[in-house]
Image (cartoon, rainbow, N blue to C red):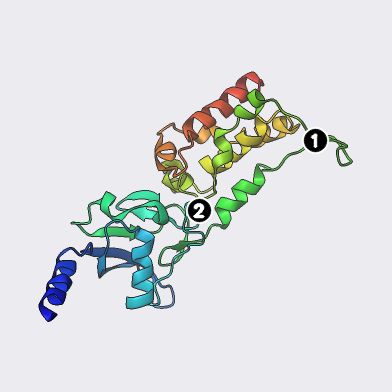
Amino acid sequence: MATPVLDKVEAQSAASPYITVTFRVRRFNPEVSAEATWEDFQLEIDPKERVLDGLHKIKWDLDGTLTFRRSCAHGICGSDAMRINGKNRLACKTLIKDINPEKPITVEPIKGLTVLKDLVVDMEPFFQAYRDVMPFLITKETNEPTRERLQSAEDRARFDDTTKCILCAACTSSCPVFWNDGQYFGPAAIVNAHRFIFDSRDEAGEQRLEILNDKDGVWRCRTTFNCTDACPRGIEVTKAIAEVKRALITRRF
């Protein structure tokens, strides 16, 4: 009776979905050194798992000091944006099998923002630009409305694409202008301004346009499409920036 059991175990072992993958992670700890270094980790992992799962295995099983952000793990919170094999991605949406696991998988922090530790960057400049464009509905009413602010399906569709932003900073930190000048508002802030500039219920479009008409506003964009390529939500970021530029020239929105 033992032989069939052994054969079954051997068959299961032979059919194991796990492969050996090397994660090459850029490490930085300001309490230890002013210089960043690369560290390799060997993992046994199912290629259908995500890069975030690999980082969890490293932190939980190999090196508890590895530092990175993540929250929902479902591509909604935007916390785990990082550079994976040289491209900005969400670790929770990037499958191991889709990024050539036969070679080392490089993981490093997004560019253009100060690295605090390992894969964690200081997001404050990014969020300050977001706050500066007043990302909320503004009306001239001083009191709460007595009824719902109605909007047609066509008016809603006008800014539908830019409502998808999850503030992951993947677009902004892929922009070469932002890399060289952190004063630039960046694609994400402009996308969130677009969302309200073209909202028919909002009455502060002119204010937002004047904010973005600054020397660090939309005119710094060089239309490289890096931001559109990097967006994990598929937002047409470059198109939105172009529409804000056009609104500045025509004052029609």
Image position of 61 (left or right of 79): left
| Residue under numbered circle 1 | 148
Q: As drawn, which residue projects farthest toward the left?
A: 3
Residue at (41, 43) in percent of width and height: 230
In which quadrant of the rendered image does the C terminus lie?
top right
Question: Which of pointers 1 and 2 indicates the residue nearer the eye?
Answer: 1
In which quadrant of the rendered image does the N terminus lie?
bottom left
User: Percent from the top left, x then y, of residue 246?
Assistant: 57, 23
Residue type, mark 2 in image:
Gly
Q: Report the Cα–Cα distance between label 1 and label 2.
A: 31 Å
Secondary structure at numbered mark 2 = loop
Based on the displayed image, in which of its 4 quarters is residue 49 positioned? bottom left
User: Percent from the top left, x then y, of residue 117?
Assistant: 44, 68
Image position of 192 (left or right of 89): right
| Residue under numbered circle 2 | 78
Which of these two is toward me, 132 or 18? Answer: 18
- Is there any visible trace of residue 185 in the rendered image? no
